[in-house]
Image (cartoon, helix red, strand yellow):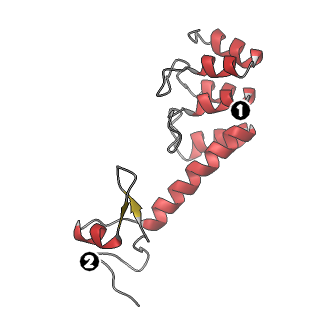
Amino acid sequence: GGLRPPGMSSGRRPPEHLEDESGGVSSPRRVREASVEIDWQRVEGEMQRYSDVWEAVSRGNAVAVQGWLNQLGLSVETRHPSDPARPTLLHYAARHGQLAVATCLLGHGASVDACTADGGTAVHVAAGQADSSLVKLLISRNGSV
């Protein structure tokens, strides 16, 4: 039942609302008028995947993070989608004091000198948390102080 935008199969459904670039809300009608076809199951799956990986990083689950990097093709330079500082996974590991996750990410080629929106590196984040083990690890990988 119900009307669907042209080209939308039964496996796809329109959203209740969408946020536009300014943070405002777009109606499903506006989306239909723009002739946008979105696979909402895929979008929801991707959103859950990203939510899960950030939680795994914060909790120190290096095995799960390694799985996302190896099997699902998650980029080691993925940036947090809703944090205004736009930290990478390595910044997030440093923020939460997760040495094993940081080691895993560095092993997969994470950029030790990637900067947040305010110019902070993972070394800066680890130092701000007074985590000497992480600071030493990041500096040993040529992280800028």
> Which residue reaches farthest bottom?
1
Numbered circle sitting on residue 33: none
Nearer to us: label 1 or label 2: 1
The answer to whether mark 1 and mark 2 are in CB contact below 8 A is no
Numbered circle sitting on residue 6: 2
Q: Quadrant of the rendered structure where residue 67 is?
A: top right
Image quarter (top left, top right, bottom left or bottom right) of the N terminus: bottom left
Q: Residue at x 58, y 56 (%)?
A: 48
Query: What amino acid is labelled 2 in the image?
Result: Pro
The residue closer to the viewer here, 74 or 96, is 96
The residue closer to the viewer here, 39 or 87, is 87
Callout 1 secondary element: loop
The residue closer to the viewer here, 15 or 37, is 15
Q: Residues within 10 Å of mark 1 (few under 14, many from 20)?
A: some
Residue 50 at x, y percent in the picture: 56, 49
Q: Quadrant of the rendered structure where residue 58 is?
A: top right
User: To which residue does mark 1 refer?
Assistant: 96
Residue 49 at x, y percent in the picture: 57, 52
Residue 36 at x, y percent in the picture: 28, 65
Image quarter (top left, top right, bottom left or bottom right) of the C terminus: top right
Q: Is residue 69 above or below residue 112?
A: below
Query: What amino acid is labelled 1 in the image?
Result: His
